[in-house]
Amino acid sequence: MSQVLVPQQPPAHRWISAERADDVAITQAIADPLFTGFGKRWWLALLATLPFVLWLLVAIVWLFYRGIGIWGINSTIVWGVAIANYVWWIGIGNAGTLISAMLLLTRQRWRASINRFAEAMTLFAVAIAGLMPIIHLGRPIYAYWLAPYPNTMALWPQWRSALVWDFWAIVSYLLFSILFWYVSLIPDLATLRDRAPRRGAQLVYGAFALGWRGSAREWSRLQTLHSTMAALGVPLVCSVHSIVGLDFAASLMPGWQESIFPPYFVVGAMYSGFAMVVVLAAGIRWGLGLQAIITPRHFDAMARILLMASIVMFYSYATEWFMGWYGGEHADRAVVRFEFTGTYAPLYWALLTCNCLVPQLLWWPFARRSLPVLILVAIAINIGMWLERILIVWNTLSHDYMPSLWRSFHFTFWDWSFLIAPLGFFAFLFLLFMRLIPSVSMFDMRELAHEEAAA
Amino acid sequence: MTATLVAQFLDAETLQAALRRVKSTGHAALDAFTPYPIEGLAEQLGLDRSRIRVAMLIGGLATAAFAFGLQWYSAVIDYPIDSGGRPLNSWQVFLLVPFEVGVFAAALTGVIAFLRSCRLPRLHDALFEIPGFERATQDRYILVAASEADPRDLRTVLTEAGAVVVTELRAP
């Protein structure tokens, strides 16, 4: 779509593959499609996601009407797809802010091309994740009982409960992510305000730009604020997914009560989130014609991080198996044996293939630079990570201390609904974001272009 | 009489060189507007250091302390429950919620402090009336300078430093 920045082969600069990328070209390439429209392709994509949005809506209404018995859960396997979804979505949600903040703190300049949409991915994923525990509640109308407020029942939340920690972690993290994302968006909103051809767009973008002028004071304050938020964001993200890990680790169940769970969940979150960023980056690059800004080298850098994370994941799984054996507890050993040979064994082997084996392809430079291979690896990782989440739930609950309670989980139509429909809902939100807000940070790109001497 | 001039430049290097010229010729450099953050520009203009981080620290710690106090009061004084023989003041797990809300509160305080220190949000600014100022958020580098003495001298300095447009700013 964008004819302003012409990518070259070989790339003209380290992180920008166009020979010339001056301020005007970058601004035009990123901002102008928002005013001229994206054409038929965007509408078709949006139309394709609509059935999923409706499906999710129907599923939620039916769930509220009938109760959680419409799922395959039973009195033994009390957790199911909703909890696995929650962990998976919040994992993806953790990655955007974590990636953006960590790359900012470590001065990785190439973050300029990916930080904006990675953070948007965070917002939508966390919002979807936040829905899951609520719909999983037997009586969702009482979800607000998690909040401490003076009430006629004279009750307070149970602060020692992992569910209460979850509530605060998700709410704080979602609000923090919105602020972190918005702060770095203000200068770009001002650019849109100043470029908007129509009065309506000028007013809307102008209101959200808060009167930004780009003065030296505003820039210096914004940078102070943004880098401080990034420094706070990294420990926050780690704590959020650690708390999700504590939902399991703070129990007394074999296979869950493990001190490795919090860090293992954080790495898993970054892993699945980075894989999702790769998929979205490929989509945005193609959809918006940003080949000059999101270069093969960016994908190469992300692929290396995926490879590293896959090794750490494998190490975490191996530690689980080792500790299950080394601890000597019969139930722990039985759960590990059940993982490899029990009811869900094919899924477990699929999980190991997707998370540990397939990403080893990325040792080879050709795989890191070939977009189709990288996308397939990233999708495999996301499938593998979802399998990991659901198997953590199923294996332990299906193979508890009491053999007379051993049962299996069977998927129902509504389990599939809650697995698939949120993906379409996520795509729907993401398409709206792409249409309304610049998917790549314009001022970061200008700075990068000047540093790369491309301007 | 004082005159305030607004000069537009094509790149950051020229702007910074002009800023040095303006200061060395005895005029005052008031502010600069750029499409991306320029390192060292705030120092060149002599802006004071921001206290955003101090505000964030205070806001974060105060909220975290409040959250801990709320848990302690509700779990120990107002609604004590013996849960499996655990101490009523289970301070180790009571630290989780204060950390989460503390970080969020620090960020929120930071945003408020940032907006206050930049006098945002504002609906309008006199500078927006200057023709071409809308390009400060796109591809122009703008310097605002004031002269106590002869504005013509300042105008010459700015033009010689490479300004493409120089506009005079007047109070209505």
Image: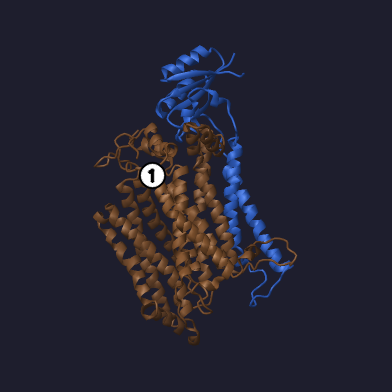
Chain colours: A brown, B blue
The residue at the far right in this view is: A152
> The N terminus of chain A lies in which quarter of the figure?
top left
Residue A286: x and y in percent read 34, 47
Kindly identify the residue that appears in the image at 67 percent across and 71 percent down: B88
Return the chain for callout 1. Answer: A
What's the residue type where badge 1 is placed? Answer: Lys
- Asked which quadrant contains residue A444, the reply is top left
Task: List the single residue furthest toward the bottom.
Answer: A404
Horizontally, residue A233 falls left or right of residue A339, namely right
Secondary structure of residue under mark 1: helix
Which one is nearer the viewer's eye here, A223 or A17?
A: A17
**Mark 1: few, some, or many residues within 10 Å (few <14, many ≥20)?**
few
* Residue A319 position within the rendered picture, expressed as x and y whole percent measured from the top left: 40, 72
In the foreground, A147 or B27: A147
**Residue tagged 1:** A40
Nearer to the camera, B116 or A24: A24
